[in-house]
Image: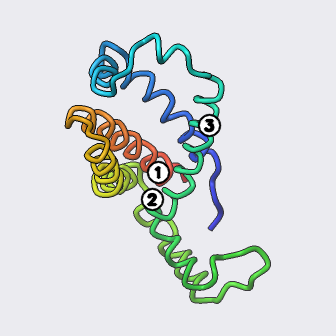
Amino acid sequence: MEINFYPILASGFVTLILGFIWYHPKVFGTIWMREAGLTEEQLSKGNMLKIFGLSFIYSLLIGMIMMPIVIHQFGAMGMIGGGAPGVVQPESYLKFMSEYGTAYRTFKHGAFHGCLTGLFLVLPIIAINGLFERKSWKYILVKGGYWILSLTIIGALICGWV
């Protein structure tokens, strides 16, 4: 199974585009700033090239790790050594991939697993951090909601973009 780098690249843009919308003052930006204790003046002082550049790179990493989460065929690859180039693939693996290589490879299925990842992995991490940082539930839910939606879209792109 070959890695498709286009949806991974798209995942880098998903988080940025969705962030522009989600954190816009007319959506959740005002709530997030108030609950985070930030002002527009403080936000304008940041190095935006660094912030957005690193965010894009980290989003690419998220896209990479979402592949084995949303594409079930990666499990079959792992059982035989990962399908590395130059490694002779067993006939059983080739037959499995010819019959089931595109099973559950839909945008809907990827969105489902992306949403579950956001809901059951990322939201608890954000909530734990928020609790120790003494942040409000509004803050936790705004950030958690952003990541649930981001991972839903990323999962859909990665799984459905065959």
Label 3, residues with CA under 10 Å away: few <14, some 14-19, many ≥20: few
Please give left or right for residue 96 compared with residue 156 in the image.
right
Verify CB contact (< 8 Å) between mark 2 and mark 1: yes
Q: Position of residue 81 (x, y in %)?
A: 64, 82
Verify CB contact (< 8 Å) between mark 2 and mark 3: no
- The residue at which mark 3 appears reads as 54
Label 2, residues with CA under 10 Å away: few <14, some 14-19, many ≥20: many
Rounded to the nearest angstrom, the CA distance separating label 3 from label 1 is 26 Å
Amino acid type at mark 1: Gly
Give me the residue at 55% from left, 75% from top: 97
Amino acid type at mark 3: Leu
Please give left or right for residue 65 compared with residue 148 in the image.
right
Residue with the most extreme top position: 41
Q: Earlier in the sequence, mark 3 or mark 1?
A: 3
Rounded to the nearest angstrom, the CA distance separating label 2 from label 3 is 30 Å
Compared with 82, 124 (above or below) is above
- The residue at which mark 1 appears reads as 160
Residue toward you, 9 or 46: 46
Give me the residue at 65% from left, 89% from top: 90
Residue toward you, 2 or 142: 142
Q: Quadrant of residue 136?
A: top left
Query: In terms of secondary structure, where does tag 3 sit?
Result: helix
Give me the residue at 52% from left, 81% from top: 96
Query: In terms of secondary structure, where does tag 2 sit?
Result: loop
Q: Position of residue 115 (x, y in %)?
A: 32, 50
- The residue at which mark 2 appears reads as 105
